[in-house]
Amino acid sequence: MRALLLGAICALSLSTPALADTLVDNVDGVTVDAKGGIDRFTGLVLADDGRIKQVLHRGDKRPERPTYKLDGKGQFLIPGMIDSHGHVMGLGFGALTLDLTDTRSLAEALAKIAAYAQAHPDRPWILGRGWNQELWPEKRFPTAAELDAVVGDRPVWLTRVDGHAGWANSKALAAAGVTATTRDPAGGKIERLAVGGKPAGVLVDTATELVDSKVPAPRPEDRDLALAKAQDLLLAKGVTAIADMGTSIEDWQAYRRAGDTGTLRIRIMAYAAGTDAMSLIGGPGPTPWLYEDRLRLNGVKLYLDGALGSRGASLKAPYADAPGTKGLRITGDTQLKNLMSRAALDKFQVAAHAIGDEANMALLSAIEEMSATYGGDRRWRIEHAQVVDPADIARFGKHGIIASMQPVHQTSDREMAEKRLGPARLAGAYAWKSIEATGAKIVFGSDVPVEAADPFAGWAAAISRTGPDGQPLGGWQPQERVSREEAFAAYTASGAYAGFAEGRFGRLVAGERADFVLIDRDPFLASPAELRETKVNEVWVGGRKVWQAK
Ligand SMILES: [Zn+2]
């Protein structure tokens, strides 16, 4: 027995000789190093288990006979980027849905719908969004009969660009039971034909729920398709890990299926969509890291308030452009503390959405109170931290708070934020630098699919406070810019820390997973405009190439 065992051990050690290493050489590499500084290097040795064995600098001796050698030909190499706030399945489903935003006539829309239906013969419903009759010469609502002429065999349901109306074909109207005798629901309208009162095809506001409620939930295979699509889109932008904000049990099962079949190429740090999903997925606590650090349920996503654009963000004082309202809290103080306790008791990490200054104040107070009860390393995450009263900013520096912010929101929201907040409250809006200066860890993300999952666009916004058009000159509230290095850390090493993944990935140092991206320019020398144009050439996760530009 003992001899057999020894033999087995010898065979094992023989089968993994020191030669089984991959050498990535001749690169212009940059990473946050083990001490939090910036390390420039020229090569990596990858072990067979997908981890980094050695970081090579100019003049370091290279392994003589690596199993595989990648000549980087002088390309720039950075760690895989971490998007600290996104919605993986939202990205995937959005990309699979028919997009009509670019159609300029009814005929063009119908042709696009017909082609899409033909390309997807197995979809039980044809779903789409983005039409706008105001952009068409017709300037009138389209009809069910017009849709029937191009897709008559299954229901079609197309949401208007603003989400406040939907266009159905006859199959969809029949599925929803909408007929000439159906009354308009409160707060909604069924567009009708002039003669006979039959539904014409477009349903407005609450009437859209009549069809929405009949759209079948995505099938597991639809979810798998959406996940595959989302992974492609993320990898194409150099994103190798993402914090998934609001994971449902169905989402989780799709991630597990991908892990089980070896098709999970990115890393997902999941935050359950509420405490019920949290318990359903995690049971008594966060899950272990699964599939070689590709998946873990870290905690729960909670919401304090809504968004600034729709005046749902909870403000301390009324909106500058709507003096009658201060916005709305989704979760009140008592309920919030109950939910946070429920999560913290079982060591789930809390990631709570707070946009308005009142919501941020309330969340900071709740964290202060929770910290007294639940000690230890909690890494309370404030998602967005978008508008903060300058009087509250210093409170970010205590209790290990992480501010999870989205640089591109600042450039997209700028004009809207000025209207909603007025000049007096802008000092604490998208205040990356001020919050970081308190000692809080800041991490960056995209909120994809609200914005594109493009860390290079985010990086450019973070260092310039200007949009893709270069406006405003000199940057908006430019005192809140962060340095190139700070933004880099917020998209890499800090993003890993915020998800309890430090030491596993996020840096290119010995012992961590070899997740890296080959790009076409030096992000530390590029202008903001050039940084936005960065092209991703190759993406590696866990020491394997998982994506390559065509
Ligand atoms: Zn979000």
Image (cartoon, rainbow, N blue to C red):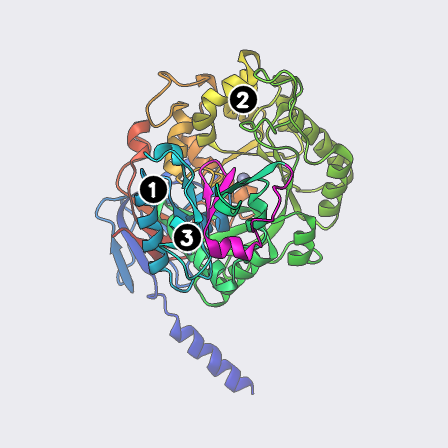
Q: Magenta residues? A: 157-186
Question: Furthest residue to the left?
Answer: 73
Q: Are marks 3 and 1 in contact (CB under 8 Å)?
A: no
Q: Nearer the viewer, mark 3 or mark 2?
A: 3
Mark 3–mark 2 Cα distance, whole angstroms, equals: 34 Å
Q: Amino acid at mark 1?
A: Leu
Q: Nearer the viewer, mark 1 or mark 2?
A: 1
First in sequence: mark 1 vs mark 2: 1
Residue 187 falls in which quadrant of the image?
A: top right
What residue is shown at x 34% (from left), y 42% (from top)?
Answer: 106
Q: Which residue is mark 3?
A: 96
Residue 187 is a magenta residue:
no
Residue situated in front as seen by the camera: 322 or 179: 179
Q: Residue 399 placed where, x, y %? A: 67, 33
Residue 171 is a magenta residue:
yes
Q: Are marks 3 and 2 in contact (CB under 8 Å)?
A: no
Q: Is residue 339 left or right of residue 103?
A: right
> Residue 429 has which mark?
2
Q: Is residue 97 left or right of residue 1?
A: left
Q: Amino acid at mark 2?
A: Ala
Q: Which residue is mark 1?
A: 106
Count residues near mark 1 (Cα–Cα under 10 Å), then give few for <14, some for 14-19, many for 20+.
many
Mark 1–mark 2 Cα distance, whole angstroms, equals: 41 Å
First in sequence: mark 3 vs mark 2: 3
Quarter, ligand 1: top right
Residue situated in front as seen by the camera: 64 or 450: 450
Residue 28 visible? The answer is yes
In the structure shown, which secondary structural element does the residue marked by tag 3 occupy?
A: helix
What residue is shown at x 38% (from left), y 18% (from top)?
Answer: 472
Residue situated in front as seen by the camera: 97 or 428: 97
